[in-house]
Image: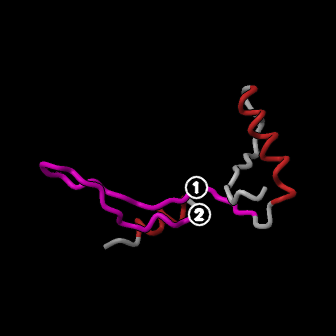
Amino acid sequence: MSSGRMRPIVVRHPQDPVEAVGEADALDATPDIETVLTRSPLFGVAAQDDGEAPRWRVLVAVAADRLQLARDGLNSLP
């Protein structure tokens, strides 16, 4: 694949024919991929401020790859 686009490779069984085609295309493209990136959920802690225009603010950076690390960060706040 020379276009430089990233193509997702999902590790699960496709639920419908359209998704199955996308999975097959991604699998066919793997020999052309030089670098494989993995991604998973990231966790952090955010709080919503009260007020006329409520806004969210991040209390613990959304960078932990495990939920427990975000909980530990919350527990460490003053």
- Amino acid type shown at disc 1: Pro
Q: Position of residue 26 (x, y in %)?
A: 78, 46
On residue 41, the disc is 1
State which region is magenta. Answer: 36-64
- Amino acid type shown at disc 2: Asp
Question: As rendered, which of 47 and 19 lies closer to the eye?
Answer: 19
SS at mark 2 in the image:
loop
Q: Per the image, is 5 magenta?
A: no
SS at mark 1 in the image:
loop
Q: In the shown orientation, is residue 22 left or right of residue 30? A: left
**Residue at 18% over, 52% down:** 50
Q: In the shown orientation, is residue 74 left or right of residue 10? A: left
Q: Position of residue 59 (x, y in %)?
A: 35, 66
Circles 2 and 1, Cβ within 8 Å, touching? The answer is: yes
Considering only vertical position in the picture, is 22 above or below 64?
Answer: above
Q: Mark 2 — residue? A: 65
Disc 1 crowd, CA 10 A, few/some/many (<14, 14-19, 20+): few
**Residue at 78% over, 55% down:** 1
Q: Position of residue 77 (x, y in %)?
A: 35, 71
Farthest front residue in view = 3
The image quarter containing residue 58 is bottom left
